[in-house]
Image (cartoon, grey):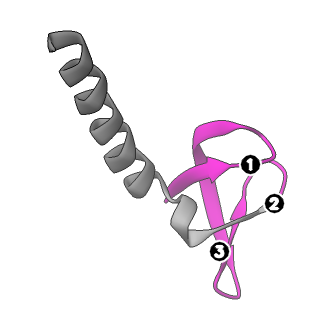
Amino acid sequence: MNGICSNCKTKHIPVHRVHGIQLCDRCNTPIDRLDSWGLRKHEEKDLARQIAAKRGA
């Protein structure tokens, strides 16, 4: 599973679980479940749509 690490500031980083907590493989910083890549990807699509709508208007 991949996520976004607030410490490394990188997307698509490998994540490992310890006792139900997701940790960054690089720095072992806990990664919040809400910070998972799926949610971010969805938000980026919405943002891209908004930008496209502004350019078209």
Residue depth check, mark 2 versus mark 3: number of the one nearer the observer: 2
Q: Which residue is mark 1?
A: 6
Report the disc number at residue 29: 2
Q: Amino acid at mark 2?
A: Thr
Residue sticking out furthest to the bottom: 19
In terms of secondary structure, what is the magenta stretch mainly?
strand
Is residue 41 rendered to the left or right of residue 23? Answer: left
What residue is rendered at 52% in x and 53% in y? 2
Quadrant position of residue 47: top left
Is residue 22 rendered to the left or right of residue 53? Answer: right
Residue depth check, mark 2 versus mark 1: number of the one nearer the observer: 1
Comparing 45 with 54, the one in front is 54
Q: CA distance from mark 1 to mark 3?
A: 17 Å
Residue sticking out furthest to the left: 56
Comparing 55 with 39, the one in front is 55
The answer to whether the residues at label 2 and label 1 have Cβ atoms under 8 Å apart is yes
Residue depth check, mark 1 versus mark 3: number of the one nearer the observer: 1
Q: Which residue is mark 3?
A: 17
Q: Which residues are magenta?
A: 1-28
Q: Amino acid at mark 3?
A: Arg
Among the two numbered marks 2 and 1 on one chain, the one whose residue lies closer to the N terminus? 1
Comparing 29 with 14, the one in front is 29
Please determine whether, in this image, residue 42 is positioned above or below residue 10: below
